[in-house]
Image: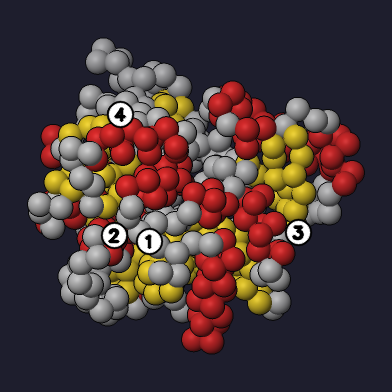
Amino acid sequence: MPRLLLLLPTATYRAEAFLDAACSLQLSVIIGMEWAPEDLPDSSGDVLLLDIRHPQAAAQTVVEFAQHHPIDAVIGVDDVTAVAAAAVAEAVGLPHNSVASVTAARNKRQMRELLSGQGIPVPRHKVFPLNGDPREFAKQVVYPCVVKPLILSASCGVIRANDEEEFRGAFRRVGALLTNLGLVARDEQARWILVEDFVPGIEVALEGLLTKGDLSPLAIFDKPDPLDGPFFEETIYVTPSRLPSDVQRDIIACADRTAKALGLREGSVHGEFRVNEHGVWVIELAARAIGGRCSRTLDFASGMSLEELILRHALRMPLPPLTRQEQAAGVMMLPIPYGGRLYEVRGQAKAKAVPGIEELTITAEPGDELVPLPEGTRYLGFLLARGATPEEVERSLRDAHRRLTVVISASPPTQTDSSPSSLRSRAMSF
């Protein structure tokens, strides 16, 4: 039975889908993570404790483990574990990306420097030390600009600034976020802040699979909501794209050039691009699959999930044609409207009853502390829809979203006093 080493962060939406795919392929699964949470699924297999944030140390641990328990594939599900996966794969002799290429894909500064050096369009940028003076930095910036961390994802800490005053506030806010997350103390790259030109235009995402450096595009997602700031909360992804075929070819070509420039050769890539009258601009290309529960939109013609496709590729098993099912599909990452503790989400039955809606998952639990972007690191949940056309899917998602009412309170509810007024709660309909 082939053995999979699945590297997980301590909090992720991605474990279940990969574990299901591993089960369907009858794989033996080893979970590699920094510590084993109590709520890890029973089906997850054995846990191997690894120093994920120090890839070479993690690789050495796996080498010793593999002497008695050979590893046939290793997968990292996010930006941090992808770096460790590259180091592990190299150490045990599996097809892999170099650690340097995955590190560059994770670090926005390195990525932009590599790509601009090869003539690939990226926003002009500067990098400033976290402990510097934002008043001085504000004078060196072209407006509008975007202030962001070097190493976070999912729009966390990404803020648009239109003038010097907004820049100073954004810079301090991103710095506070990195400090509060504990990243400044343990990661050198968290001690710098990237500032780049705001690139106008529409934004799209691309999912692809690399084999020996050749890119196979799997899907292009439209993002129909404008992402112009001040924050950049992603909500709706819909595929197939409604862009003209020549523009889609340009996006795929740009993704291919970007992967080659970074030195990526194996496995999943997830790219974010802006498209305007000047062409296709790279915002990022990550050496991992799409995050959250968004992969559930990608059912391939063979009935295979994205995760099973990724595992088959890593194990060098036969792959079916990489074509999606004909139906359009989309996902809405449910935003957190404001901070506080979740009391309840009302209207779920009405949302599920909307034609085209296949799934509604609220991933936040009652009593959870909710933090909206740009400081937030999670979504409230996910809506999944399918339909005959992308337009139909988008309408279904928006209609279902409007039927939800989120009740957030200033303090967690109690059994003896749970009325909305006593909780000082506010209900927001979308």
**Disc number placed over residue 315 in the picture, else none:** none
**Mark 4 or mark 3: whose residue is earlier in sequence:** 4
- Spatial CA distance of label 1 from label 2 is 7 Å
Please state the horizontal and vertical placement of residue 428, each as a whole percent of the image.
44, 41
Residue lying furthest top? 416
Mark 1 or 2 closer to N-term?
1
- Label annotation for residue 49: 4
Mark 3 or 2: the one toward you: 2
Q: Which residue is drawn at 63% across and 33% down?
A: 188
**Given the image, on which type of amino acid does mark 3 rest?**
Arg
Lower position in the chain sequence, tag 3 or tag 2:
3
Quick check: 390 left or right of 323?
right
The reply to whether callout 1 and callout 2 are in contact (CB within 8 Å) is: yes
Report the disc number at residue 124: 3
Q: How crowded is mark 2: few (under 14 residues within 10 Å), some or many (20 or more)?
A: many
Q: Mark 2 points at which residue?
A: 314
Q: What element carries label 2?
A: helix
Measuring from the top left, give residue 239's x and y in whole percent: 39, 71
Query: Residue 175 at x, y = what percent?
Result: 67, 31
Q: How far apart are marks 1 and 3 (CA)?
A: 29 Å
Identify whether 412 is placed above or below 262: above
Name the one closer to the observer, 369 or 96.
96
Q: How crowded is mark 4: few (under 14 residues within 10 Å), some or many (20 or more)?
A: some
Q: Is residue 404 left or right of residue 132?
A: left
